[in-house]
């Protein structure tokens, strides 16, 4: 397993990022945590629909997305808001999407981030197609797709990996192995020793990294993205991380896992090790921490306000979005639905 | 005018669009070197090369998923599913992904994919390779569904489907591949959502699709010998559905028959019957009659398959006995 920065903030290999960039990404980690906790709070107030928290997985998402070019494709899931935000997805639209407003699924051009996949696994094959089409059009844009350990049991994972290998496309498969697929532990999900080793079967490199280590995640993703961009094919990255919270706000993890396990992972927190690292290099202070937390909180509040200020979606919009032109048979149903509204 | 088989019309139609749009690509199993297991894509590899005519692993989910991903970059894509029965293997990608993309992105991400597939019975391929599954797709909001019955319609509706910004499932009928028809000179582009009156009549309307169209026409010839004037409509497109043409015909004839190859429950004709009962009830002089395959797995045995799928005899006899 690739590790560069230990949980106690010690470097065990050369840092792949300079101090300025590390500082920027630390702010992103703090921001991601603020967004995540705010979303859970909003859900409890009934202002968001079911939410899937990613606390504990911030470094996996921020570190990997930081390795992309701004116009690379990102195809993630409902638990990947931090990665999506890193790649330019507007925060207010992330919130709008979680209120059930489908306008949250249409980021402005030229942001090449797909709306979060709600089905498990169905999106991985889209990333393969995106990468294939970019190559056909002579572009060196790559596609990265995010998924969890549970999704590797879906047939889509096999088909996407196999297709990517055969088509030799510039696609990075980024698995956040957070230990649990709802209540199923990783060892009940697959008899493979690691998820990374599955790459061998598809003729591509696979690498396991400490997913709570910003540096290791960035380094591995940067290498995989470079390979993809140079036309050297796909890569599978397994980021070892942990879902500190529930599967979703509708889930209670105390029913299936121990407090001890979560506590152990708390000690491997992805933010804390970067904080220590920066602190030891005089790049961190309590005042600055308070300042960036306040900034994150303000930006998150602003995005929530923007999302909540949108006019409520109307039923006509559902009909209008379905097809480029509304078929006559639907025009009548649209009229009836509007009357009933 | 050139005469082409329905089979050759498929490649002819695809080639017309590939010449027009250099971004158009196609992927599927055995479509390149083999020219398709039904020989519907012969010659395309030679003309357009392996980057645009792309053989894939046996991987229907990835075929539709990759087609959708590629289309989301803005290029049109044709994806072939070898037998329409296999749509069941990749239904998630079709029904939950492609069909929902435009809605779930507020109309931003349409998916210009044409899913071509060989549909229907008559070839003794059995319960898992002979089904008519157009109704599976018709019931999914967000998909368009087309099923041509003639070579000219194959070309024209293929062009319309490829140029359409929404996902279209294009059903090619296996038992029509050998049939022949005239193809007009020049570029042919038809319109989705348009039915066609293929035989005019005054006593009853027979609405049919794909292989059932020539059978309905033959039955109408025999009915004419008995003095029954049947109007035959080739429905052509299930989504969008051209209800105007059907309703106008029923207004004239006052009787409606549907001829459907799909198993009876929730077949496309049930929707047509419902619409006609709703909007043209007072024009009707008798009950709407659906002539369908029974609600059974399609048998492989020759005699049983022939018994199951509506035949010219069954259409003729049903109309003759019930028109009163």
Image (cartoon, helix red, strand yellow):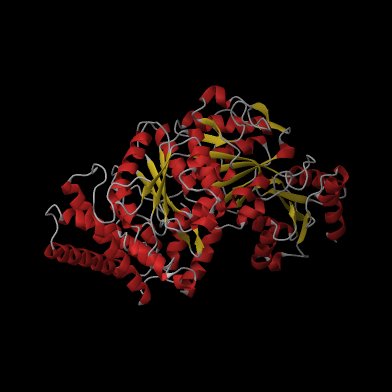
Q: How many marks?
A: 0
Residue A198 horizontal/vertical position (percent): 50, 43
* Residue B113 visible in the displayed image: no
Quadrant containing the N terminus of chain B is top right
Q: Give whichever of A27, B218 is nearer the camera.
A: A27
Q: Is residue B119 left or right of residue B124?
A: left
Q: Give whichever of B308, B88 is nearer the camera.
A: B88
Q: Is residue A77 left or right of residue B60?
A: left
Q: Residue furthest bottom?
A: A45
Tell me the residue at 31%/62% (across/down): A267
* Residue A315 visible in the displayed image: yes
Tell me the residue at 71%/49% (across/down): B132
Tell me the residue at 80%/43% (across/down): B218
Q: Give whichever of B80, A140 is nearer the camera.
A: A140
Residue A156 horizontal/vertical position (percent): 53, 48
Quadrant containing the C terminus of chain B is bottom right
Residue B223 horizontal/vertical position (percent): 84, 49
Up/down of B213 relative to B178, above or below: below
Q: Is residue B273 left or right of residue B99?
A: right
Residue A143 horizontal/vertical position (percent): 39, 42
Up/down of A252 relative to B291, above or below: below
Up/down of B145 relative to B103, above or below: above
Displayed quadrant of residue A169: top left
Displayed quadrant of residue B59: top right
Tell me the residue at 34%/52% (across/down): A60
């Amino acid at each position: 397993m690739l590790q560069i920065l230990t949980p106690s903030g010690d470097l065990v290999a050369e840092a792949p990022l300079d101090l300025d960039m590390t500082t920027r990404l630390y702010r992103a980690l703090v921001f991601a945590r603020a967004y995540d906790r705010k979303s859970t709070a909003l859900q409890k107030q009934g202002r968001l629909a079911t939410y899937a928290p990613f606390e504990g997985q911030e470094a996996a998402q921020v570190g990997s997305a930081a390795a992309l070019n701004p116009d690379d494709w990102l195809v993630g899931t409902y638990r990947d808001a931090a990665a999506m935000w890193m790649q330019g997805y507007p925060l207010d639209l992330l919130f709008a999407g979680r209120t059930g407003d489908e306008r949250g699924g249409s980021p402005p051009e030229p942001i090449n981030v797909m709306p979060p996949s709600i089905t498990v696994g169905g999106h991985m094959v889209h990333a393969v197609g995106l990468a294939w089409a970019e190559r056909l059009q002579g572009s060196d844009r790559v596609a990265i797709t995010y998924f969890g350990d549970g999704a590797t049991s879906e047939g889509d994972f096999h088909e996407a990996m196999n297709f990517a290998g055969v088509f030799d496309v510039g696609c990075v498969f980024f698995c956040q192995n957070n230990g649990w697929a709802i209540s199923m532990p990783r060892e009940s999900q697959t008899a493979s020793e690691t998820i990374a080793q599955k790459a061998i079967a598809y003729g591509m490199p696979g690498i396991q990294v400490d997913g709570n280590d910003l540096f290791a995640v960035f380094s591995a993703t940067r290498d995989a993205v470079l390979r993809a961009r140079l036309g050297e094919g796909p890569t599978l990255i397994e980021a070892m991380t942990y879902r500190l919270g529930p599967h979703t706000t509708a889930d209670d993890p105390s029913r299936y896992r121990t407090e001890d396990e979560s506590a152990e992972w708390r000690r491997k927190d992805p933010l804390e090790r970067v904080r220590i690292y920066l602190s030891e290099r005089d790049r961190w202070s309590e005042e600055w921490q308070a300042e960036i937390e306040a900034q994150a909180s303000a930006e998150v509040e602003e995005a929530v306000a923007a999302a909540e200020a949108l006019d409520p979606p109307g039923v006509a919009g559902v009909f209008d979005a379905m097809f480029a032109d509304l078929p006559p048979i639907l025009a009548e149903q649209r009229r009836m639905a509007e009357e009933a509204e | 005018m050139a005469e082409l088989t329905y089979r050759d019309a498929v490649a002819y139609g695809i080639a017309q669009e590939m010449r027009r749009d250099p971004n158009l690509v196609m992927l599927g199993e055995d479509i390149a070197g083999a020219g398709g297991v039904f020989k519907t894509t012969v010659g395309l590899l030679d003309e357009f090369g392996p980057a645009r005519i792309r053989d894939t692993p046996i991987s229907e989910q990835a075929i539709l998923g990759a087609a959708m991903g590629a289309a989301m970059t803005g290029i049109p894509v044709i994806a072939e599913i070898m037998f329409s029965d296999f749509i069941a293997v990749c239904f998630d990608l079709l029904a939950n992904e492609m069909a929902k993309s435009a809605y779930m992105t507020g109309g931003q991400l349409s998916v210009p994919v044409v899913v071509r597939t060989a549909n229907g019975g008559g070839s003794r391929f059995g319960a898992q390779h002979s089904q008519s599954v157009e109704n599976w797709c018709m019931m999914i909001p967000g998909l368009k569904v087309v099923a041509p019955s003639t070579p000219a319609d194959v070309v024209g509706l293929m062009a319309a489907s490829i140029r359409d910004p929404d996902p279209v499932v294009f059903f090619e009928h296996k038992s029509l591949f050998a049939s022949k028809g005239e193809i007009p000179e020049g570029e042919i582009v038809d319109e989705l959502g348009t039915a066609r009156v293929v035989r005019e009549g005054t006593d009853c309307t027979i609405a049919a699709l794909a292989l059932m169209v020539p059978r309905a026409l033959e039955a109408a010839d025999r009915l004419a010998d008995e003095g029954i004037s049947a109007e035959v409509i080739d429905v052509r497109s299930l989504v969008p559905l051209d209800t105007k043409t059907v309703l106008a015909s029923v207004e004239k004839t006052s009787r409606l028959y549907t001829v459907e190859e799909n198993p009876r429950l929730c077949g496309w004709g049930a929707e047509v019957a419902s619409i006609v009962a709703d909007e043209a009830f007072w024009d009707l002089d008798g009950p709407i009659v659906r002539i369908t395959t029974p609600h059974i797995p399609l048998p492989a045995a020759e005699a049983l398959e022939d018994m199951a799928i509506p035949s010219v005899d069954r259409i003729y006899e049903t109309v003759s006995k019930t028109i009163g």
